[in-house]
Amino acid sequence: MTEALSREMALRIGLAAQDLPDVDAGSLIDILVQAVGVPMTEAKVAQLGMKAFRKAGGETLIPIPSDQLKAVLRLLKGEGVDADVDDFTLDPYQEGDMPGSIRVACASNGAEELDGHFGSCRRFLIYQLSGTEQRLIDVRRNEEPEDVEDKNKWRASLIADCQVLAVMSIGGPAAAKVVRANIHPIKQPQGGQARDLLAKLQSVLAGSPPPWLARVMGQEAQTLTGFLEEDA
């Protein structure tokens, strides 16, 4: 490929490559050239579909789960690229402000989206949630130090003050580390707006929470019903 990439396209590729295990920026460029041809422009990538993207990636992209690959494709199309930790406005919060509340971590790549895989999301959005209120109280970069031996354990420690973790996907070994840290993982494969999930959680908090959530809240469980399932 002889045509120079635009600065914006180069940024998108760099960020997307970070979310693909064992795929560097150069390899991702080769895949995109295979998919859209040259010159590789933002307009062409904006029209790229999942089927064509996966086909162009061949064996390289076979191990990547579909939901994770969809998040990567959104990054390549520029969705959420501009959102960084410093771009978020946090709500004021002090410990004890919201009695009976829980703390929820959402794996995110763009703005206040629940669109991240536990192992490769760019950040965790930290919300304090009660039956009547939700506050964004922190944003934590998912950037483990190079010398970390157990990355999943490190990520679990990053959100150790949370009781619930919402992700698009999480592997079995990683989920075990999260559960061991007393954090309940909730998988939302379809993704969506983080605050939409929080609104659903609020309805559960305000009603009769399932046993695991009642324990988190320090309440006695009244019913097993609820839209949440205890799966990892």
Image (cartoon, rainbow, N blue to C red):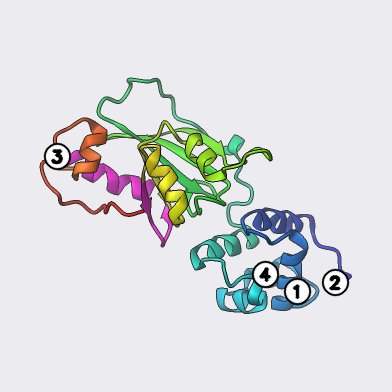
Pair 4/1: label in front: 1
Q: Are marks 1 and 2 in contact (CB under 8 Å)?
A: yes
Residue 88, can we see it? Answer: no
State which tag comes first along the sequence, 4 or 3.
4
Which segment is the magenta one? 185-207
> Is residue 119 something one can see in this rendering?
yes
Q: Which residue is mark 1?
A: 33
What residue did someone put label 4 on?
45
Residue 61: percent from left, percent from top:
62, 70
Residue that carries the numbered disc 3 in the rendered image: 221
| 198 part of magenta stretch | yes
Q: How packed is label 4: few (under 14 Cα within 10 Å), some, or many (20 or more)? A: many
x 54%, y 38%: residue: 154
In the displayed structure, would residue 86 be above or below residue 6?
A: above
Q: CA distance from mark 1 to mark 2?
A: 8 Å
Q: Does 110 sit above or below residue 139?
A: below
Q: Is residue 25 above or below residue 210?
A: below
Q: Marks 3/1: CA distance?
A: 55 Å
Q: Distance of mark 4 from mark 1, alpha carbons?
A: 10 Å
Q: CA distance from mark 2 to mark 4?
A: 16 Å
Q: Amino acid at mark 1?
A: Val
Closer to the eye: label 2 or 4: 2
Q: Between disc 4 and disc 1, whose residue precedes?
A: 1
Residue 1: numbered disc = 2
- First reached walking from the N terminus: tag 2 or tag 4: 2
Label 4 – label 3 distance at C-alpha = 50 Å
- The disc, 2 or 3, on the residue closer to the chain's N-terminal end is 2
Please tell me which residue is depicted at 41% across the width and 31% down the height of the picture: 161
